[in-house]
Amino acid sequence: MKVSKLKSLLIKIFKKKGLNHIDALISTNALINAEMVGAYGHGLSRLKMYCDRISKKVINPKPRIKVKKISPSISHIDADDSIGFVAADIGIKKAIDNAKKTGIALVAIKNSGHYGLSGYYAEQAVKKNLMVFCFTNGPPALAPHGSKKSLFGTNPICFGVPTGKTPFIFDTSTSMINRGAIRRASKLGQKIPYGVALDKNGKITTDANKALQGSQIPISTFRGSGLAWMVDILSGVLTGSSHSGKTKDPFDDLTGPQNMGHLFITINPKIFIGGNFLKEMKINISRVKRLPKAKGFTSILYPGERRNKTYRKNLNKDIFIPSKILKEINNLNAIK
């Protein structure tokens, strides 16, 4: 489907659900961006979930979002159970604005929901020549080290920095695979890679449905578990949001809002080394890229290069939508 047609269709669907045009556009752009960069588990496969949550009144389509100024650098946002895209859009823009004025900013968000790709927000800050950290927690999916029961979300960690060229965007979940990829595989009847998830009995499985009933394997065992815990504290405890297993699953638990938390930290790199920052970044990257290549590698890529290459490759292409997901979109559009 052509991007322009898809964009109009998604805006129409979100507006039917009660979002105003601006919020519908913000949500649509985030979903389409996920498809364009190849992060399909955070794209159109989630549309029905967002719409279901609005219908069940656990996402507020007309939120009264409050931004509390703590200091010129620090803001605390109450998202009023809005769709996560809108809360995060306000949050990252406030973080960018504050850092431009003071050199560094910290923006905490509570009473929000799933906001899609962290890298999408990081890139917005990087394009304003800022360094950025993005954190968000999620519903139980990953068992803490030493436990056989899921408690932490896949709790992504995202870091972005300007390079003068393609943005450096490191965006990773603290699990071996993100939850959205498993959800999408389940929806499409596909297998997941071996060694990324366990079934409810603690055995490794490639069955997406069994993985959703079990738990996901953290990156680097206890280290990944520790990082997931760190993100739970930063985006859950610190922001005043749900944490330690109390964040509701957006697909399976429609009993109330998710109350997810997000944390954005933005830094103007010029505050320390002035105009030399991009020059030093160029040196930093070139030293890595000049290293001898390991067997099977023709180049050394920094985080964000593959993402950017995928986006550019898809710029002038129609977006492929699997038939099952297309049917969901058409059904949502048919609702009066």
Image (cartoon, helix red, strand yellow):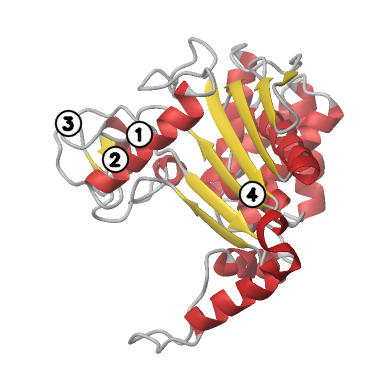
Per the image, the residue denoted by label 3 is 148
Asked if disc 1 and disc 2 are in contact, CB closer than 8 Å, the reply is yes
Per the image, the residue denoted by label 1 is 229
Q: Earlier in the sequence, mark 2 or mark 3?
A: 3
Q: CA distance from mark 4 to mark 2?
A: 23 Å
Question: Looking at the picture, how far across and down is residue 331, in whole percent?
Answer: 65, 31
Q: CA distance from mark 2 to mark 3?
A: 12 Å
Per the image, the residue denoted by label 2 is 225
**Amino acid type of disc 3?**
Lys
Q: Quadrant of the N terminus?
A: bottom right
Question: Looking at the picture, how far across and down is residue 34, in whole percent?
Answer: 62, 50
Which quadrant of the structure image shows residue 78?
Answer: top right
Q: Is residue 138 visible?
A: no
Residue at the image point whose x is 56% and y is 36% from the top: 46
Question: Badge 3, how many Cα within 10 Å: few under 14, some, many 20+?
Answer: some
Q: CA distance from mark 3 to mark 1?
A: 15 Å
Left or right: 11, with 153 as reference point: right
The mark closer to the camera, 3 or 1, is 1
Asked if disc 4 and disc 3 are in contact, CB closer than 8 Å, the reply is no
Q: Is residue 297 visible?
A: yes
Question: Looking at the picture, how far across and down is residue 283, in whole percent?
Answer: 59, 79
Question: Badge 1, how many Cα within 10 Å: few under 14, some, many 20+?
Answer: many
**Amino acid type of disc 1?**
Trp
Q: Earlier in the sequence, mark 4 or mark 1?
A: 4
Label 4, secondary structure: give it: helix
Per the image, the residue denoted by label 4 is 122
Relative height, residue 102 to residue 129 (above, below): above
